[in-house]
Amino acid sequence: MKRVKILVLSSIFAVIVSLFGTGFSFQASAAEPTKQIGFKENIKGTYFVIPYDKETVRMEKSVSSDNRVGEINVYDKNTNELLDTYKVEDIVPSTKTMAAMATTGTVIREASQTKKAGSASAKLTTRMSVYTSGSFVQIQSVLSNNWSTVSGVHQLVNSNADTISSTGSFPTTQIQTVGATTFEVKTTVSGQAGWEAAGFSISASYGSEIYMRKNVSFNFTYSVY
């Protein structure tokens, strides 16, 4: 099975990956991450760096009617497998409107990456403070990194994440987030083969209950220009 190699955008994050060793595995896919940084893809006026060869993937985009939420689904062009989902969302206070925020002000923005492992999926979200004034936009600071499960009966363990400014300080126009987590599922002998096919391995067993795990790394770059 071919492994999809995730681009590590900064050696600063090597310590995160080292917590989990080198056992990262992903579902087979014809799409390969590029040796360089990937390519920028626009979504509602901002950008994600997509870490694959552009010729091997296709994308589907959607933007909410109020321009508050934008999403990019990245698929393997040959297998039609969903590789990653990138999402940006502005958290607008109830006392303001998107039109007012687009003119001037500070908004809380979330940029996220979602990955699947079999029927399980998880999302890593970076929450930041973004200042806008007309066409001028900058990321003031990173507020938090949060993990969440999206679908499937599983939990996340040993989760770590960090975000840096691509310019070395804040305010900035681009951030890089890298994280690592472990998917853990509880199954039985009858369900074991399906999870093994998705790259999981047995971590423990108690009677008829089997616990299986898979290490997954996350890596995304978000830019306001």
Image (cartoon, rainbow, N blue to C red):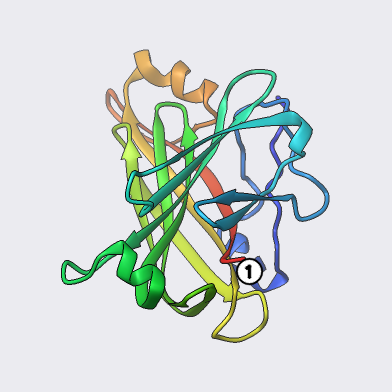
Residue 144 in sight:
no
Q: Residue at x 33, y 64 (%)?
A: 99
Can you say which quadrant of the picture contains the C terminus?
bottom right
Position of 213 compared to 166: left or right?
A: left
User: Among all residues in the image, which is located at the extreme left?
Assistant: 95
What kind of residue is marked 1?
Answer: Phe
User: x, y percentage for residue 153?
Assistant: 29, 33
Q: Residue at x 54, y 85 (%)?
A: 171
Position of 186 compared to 225: left or right?
A: left
User: Among all residues in the image, which is located at the extreme top?
Assistant: 190
Q: Residue at x 74, y 42 (%)?
A: 33
User: x, y percentage for residue 209?
Assistant: 29, 28
The front one of 57 and 104 is 104
In what element is the residue under mark 1?
Answer: helix
Residue 156 in sight:
yes
> To which quarter of the image does residue 57 belong?
top right
Position of 159 compared to 99: left or right?
A: right
Q: Is residue 50 placed above or below 141 in the rendered structure? A: above
The front one of 181 and 206 is 181
The front one of 90 and 157 is 90
Can you say which quadrant of the picture contains the N terminus?
top right
Q: Is residue 182 placed above or below 144 in the rendered structure? A: above
Q: Residue at x 60, y 50 (%)?
A: 42
User: Among all residues in the image, which is located at the extreme right?
Assistant: 35
User: x, y percentage for residue 172?
Assistant: 58, 80
What residue is pinned by disc 1?
13
Q: Count the numbered circles shown.
A: 1
User: x, y percentage for residue 120?
Assistant: 39, 33
Q: Is residue 75 placed above or below 215 in the rendered structure? A: above
| Crowd rating for badge 1 (residues with CA inside 10 Å; few <14, some 14–19, many 20+) | some
